[in-house]
Amino acid sequence: MSPSIRTHALRYPVPTHLWMPETTMICITIWILLLSLCCCLRLLLGTRRRRPTEPPLENGNIPYLGCALRFGSNPLEFLRSCQRQHGCIFTCRIAGQYIHFLCDPFSYDTVIHHRRHLDWNKFHLSTSAKVFGHESMDPSHGHTTEDLQQTFQKTLQGKALPSLIQTMMENLQSAMLLSGTSKTRVMDWQQDGILAFCYKVMFEASYLTLFGTELSTHKKEGPFKQEVQKATVLSALENFKEFDKIFPALVAGLPIHIFKTGRSARENLAKNFLYQNLSRRNNISDLISLRMHLNDTLSNFDDLSKAKTHLALLWASQANTLPVAFWSLFYLIRSPEAIKAATEEVTKMLESSGQTTSLHRPHPTLSREQLDSMLVLDSIIKEAMRLSSASLNIRIAKEAFQLDLESKRSYHIRKDDMIAFYPQMLHFDPEIYEEPLTYKYDRFLDEKGQEKKTFYKDGRKLHNYFMPFGSGVTKCPGRFFAMYEIKLFLTLLLYHFELELVDGDIKTPPLDQSRVGLGILQPTHDVDFRYKYKTP
Ligand code: HEM
């Protein structure tokens, strides 16, 4: 023992039960050294070196995390600076994963249609199981043989749309107009946050459209029945918001057990979708009834897992639609030209079908064809999405292969690497969208007032210029319904109410960057507005 340790030991006598023989101390020290060496080796060897035919590589300075923090704090700026440095494709290490970012929109189709070597499903399915807590829906894992793509196409697109539109329209009217008794209240100006209002109205209407109404409440009478229903849905909304808060953390791989409130919110939501609860509901959409049937016939999921697959659909149907409703309404109310053009379009459409803007016709209806022809609203919604969308399109390499870009350059891609594009780079590209940070309600209309489909870069016409719904086979299957939902929402608001911002000079709230990569970003704070019934 060295003299200093000895004197120390004399001054502070160690209790005898804590004495350790010297050999044990040496063993522990050797173990610590060995462990540290292993960690260093792992970090060194785990750091990839670029091979000559691979895209330029950004390993980042932080072990394991790589570029994650720089990417997370401002993805658009980070990717633009990498693009300036490396060109149209480069590889970044992000949280241990190697991601090849492709920034040349002319090459997007090469990846989108490259199905032989690229897996588009694996990432979605494993993320869904991790976040919602159901068994894997990947047929190769043996729990189900359901073809989800087919289910979605059958129940969310084509012939399925008219009845979804009809039900959504009815549900929106009752969610928006409250019950008959409280209608008089809205004759005066009412004040609310736009985000809070969109969440309440859109969540309720969309929830009831997909999951139907409670059978038990049908026994009760009129307004009381509606109030009970509303209270149940609003309680689901509170759970949805709590769960949605932890969503980015769950996608990043944190276990749900560390989030007490978020976890119990998820379990509460899932409980609503247990078979015994769903079977007490009326008018369930084809999507949910077919999924219930296929869960029962094609899967070996237990009851809770089945319920959690429905929860995944609740999230998919609401998490992007709600913030799009916010941004569409916010920009609409703030822009006098937009609200004028939209009001004219709504009035013209309703008048042409004999429905005038009057309290005596409280329930207007619109067909799919009529909604399709409302191109001003279409442009208003698309412009709101262009400014707020931050989704990542991801594919995983099933095996090593050669990626041939449109520019005739080829790159070697290793097995299990990811290829990603970040459409915000397109949406904010000044060459494609002049003054990209400015809201222009008619950006997606041409000189004749028709849908504008021609956008250029480097003097060449772009095929992929607007991608808030993803791309290729993984493109959002609910995109048509989503557009109709928001069109209906705006139409009804413009039909029934006068709308104004409480503070007419309010600045656009910043985008909440915590959800980057996951779709439409929410505002960091709400914005107050006023609404009251239009007088006939
Ligand atoms: C404006 C609203 C919406 C936006 C911006 C949006 C966007 C997206 C995006 C970006 C994806 C991932 C696509 C990819 O990775 O390539 C997605 C997937 C999906 N969306 Fe939407 N979505 C919206 C509304 C809806 C609605 C209303 C529904 C259903 C009623 C829905 C159902 C789905 C489903 C089921 C998936 C997963 C598809 C799969 O994994 O194969 N979405 N959505």
Image (cartoon, grey):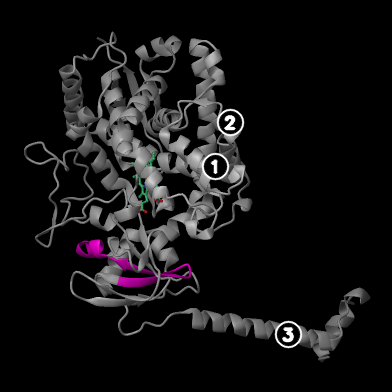
* Residue 327 showing in the rendered view: no
Whether residue 403 is in magenta: the answer is no
Instruction: Tell me the element at label 1.
Output: helix
Q: Looking at the picture, does residue 414 appear above or below residue 136?
A: below
Q: Between disc 2 and disc 3, whose residue precedes? A: 3
Q: Position of residue 227 (x, y in %)?
A: 51, 18
What separation in Å lies between label 2 and label 3 (alpha carbons)? 59 Å
Point out which mark residue 29 bears: 3
Q: Label for residue 296?
A: 1
Query: Between tags 1 and 3, which lies in front?
Result: 1
Residue 102 sits inside the magenta stretch: yes
Q: What amino acid does circle 3 point to?
A: Thr
Q: Is residue 313 above or below residue 19?
A: above
Q: Nearer the viewer, mark 2 or mark 3?
A: 2
**Which mark lies nearer to you, 1 or 2?**
1
Kind of residue at badge 1: Asp
* Residue 54 visible in rendering: yes
Q: Are discs 1 and 3 less than 8 Å apart at CB?
A: no
Which quadrant holds residue 120? bottom left
Work out which quarter of the rendered image holds the C terminus and state it: top left
For mark 1, does the 10 Å Cα neighbourhood hold few (<14), some (14 to 19), or many (20 or more) residues? some
Q: Is mark 1 within 8 Å of ligand 1?
A: no
Q: Is residue 307 above or below residue 470?
A: above
Q: Which residues are magenta?
A: 90-110
